[in-house]
Image (cartoon, rainbow, N blue to C red):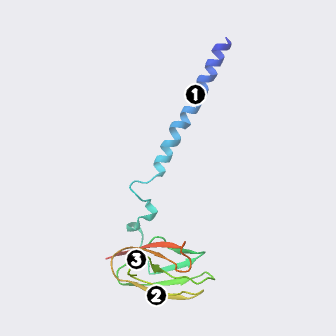
């Protein structure tokens, strides 16, 4: 009788562990993305912008989408100075120093995807996709 009760308890425990073991991976798979990047980094679905804001040491929107030839306003809401500078060589764009409360203009001329940074704060980074 004790063996049967123990066998029943072990069987119940296995069943109760089996369901979460099957369900959790299925749920996590549904949260993942297909392809090499996450959907947040797929700028083709984003609405083109004409403004990039710097606040809390971050660029927004991130990533940004801009139509070629657009003059983009870069506004700094932080107390520290920042830049919006192409990481490429030669640089396709550079806002120059944007102090607190200032707005500078950058023109994105050539279609492509560009990584940019702040020259004062290299951990700040963003991407902009310039479309036709």
Residue closest to the eye, 43 or 109? 109
The x, y position of residue 75, in whole percent, is 53, 83
Q: Earlier in the sequence, mark 3 or mark 1?
A: 1
Q: Considering the numbered disc 1 on the image, is that residue within a helix, a strand or a loop?
A: helix
Asked where in the image residue 5 lies, by quadrant, the reply is top right
The x, y position of residue 35, in whole percent, is 38, 55
Above or below for 23 versus 120: above
Which residue is at a point 34% across and 80% down the rendered structure image?
A: 68
Q: Considering the numbered disc 2 on the image, is that residue within a helix, a strand or a loop?
A: strand
User: For the residues carrying marks 3 and 2, which lies nearer the camera in this image?
Assistant: 3
Asked where in the image residue 111 lies, by quadrant, the reply is bottom left
Q: Which corner quadrant holds the C terminus?
A: bottom left
The x, y position of residue 104, in whole percent, is 49, 88
Q: Earlier in the sequence, mark 2 or mark 1?
A: 1
> What is the C-alpha distance between the residues marked 3 and 1?
56 Å
Is residue 97 toward the left or the right of residue 37 in the image? right
Which residue is at a point 43% across and 60% down the rendered structure image?
A: 39
Q: Earlier in the sequence, mark 3 or mark 2?
A: 3
**Which disc, if any, is residue 88?**
3
Which residue is at a point 46% across and 63% down the rendered structure image?
A: 40
**Which disc, if any, is residue 107?**
none
The residue where tag 2 is placed is: 105
Is residue 128 toward the left or the right of residue 121 in the image? left
Q: Residues within 10 Å of mark 2 (few under 14, many from 20)?
A: some
Q: Which corner quadrant holds the N terminus?
A: top right
């Amino acid at each position: 009788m004790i063996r049967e009760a123990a066998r029943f308890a072990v069987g119940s425990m296995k069943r109760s562990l089996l369901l979460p073991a099957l369900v959790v991976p299925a749920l996590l798979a549904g949260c993942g993305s297909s392809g090499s990047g996450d959907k947040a980094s797929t700028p083709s679905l984003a609405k083109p912008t004409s403004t990039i804001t710097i606040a809390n040491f971050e660029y927004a929107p991130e990533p940004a989408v801009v139509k070629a030839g657009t003059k983009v306003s870069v506004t700094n809401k932080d107390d520290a100075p920042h830049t919006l500078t192409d990481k490429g060589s030669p640089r396709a764009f550079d806002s120059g120093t944007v102090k607190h409360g200032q707005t500078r203009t950058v023109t994105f001329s050539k279609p492509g995807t560009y990584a940019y940074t702040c020259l004062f704060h290299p951990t700040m980074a963003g991407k902009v996709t310039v479309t036709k």
